Amino acid sequence: MEGRVMKVTVELSVKHHEQLLRRSDCSSREYALLIYRCIVLRQRAERREPCVEIRCELEEANHLLEHANRVSPDAACEIAQSISGSREL
């Protein structure tokens, strides 16, 4: 399937997004991915809470996962769940 790109919507809690942002160099690739995000309200458990969505290519999501593994294991878990749920577009 040449020409197809795997897209991922990475979902993070606001808390984990902010942790990653604080622990990223502002000139890094990770920082660039983290600042281009959308904050949405998601139903979690019995309440609505803000959630950060980052739409990116699978390769970028994997790069973000590597960074999160180094600086925020809890965020890494959320990113890994998003990647495992990705599909080809």
Image (tube, rainbow, N blue to C red):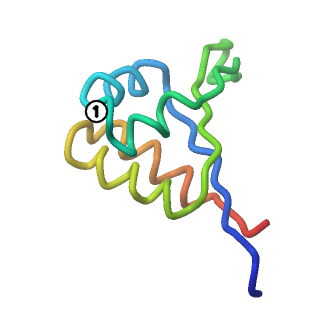
> Residue reaching furthest bottom?
1
Residue 30 location in percent, x, y?
Answer: 38, 42
- Tell me the quarter of the image containing the N terminus: bottom right
Can you tell which quarter of the image residue 4 is in? Answer: bottom right
* Residue 45 sits above or below residue 72 on the image: above
Label 1 neighbourhood size at 10 Å, few (<14), some (14-19), many (20+)? some
Look at mark 1 in the image and give the residue it sits on: 24
**Residue at 39% across / 27% down in the picture?**
16
**Residue at 39% across / 45% down in the picture?**
29
Can you tell which quarter of the image residue 23 is in? Answer: top left
**Residue at 39% across / 56% down in the picture?**
63
Residue 79 location in percent, x, y?
Answer: 46, 47
**Residue at 62% across / 22% down in the picture?**
45
Horizontal side, residue 87 vs residue 61: left or right: right
Residue 40 location in percent, x, y?
Answer: 69, 21
Name which residue type carries label 1: Ser
> Residue reaching furthest left?
70
* Residue 25 sits above or below residue 19 on the image: below
Q: How many marks?
A: 1
> Residue reaching furthest front?
27
Quick one: SS at disc 1? loop
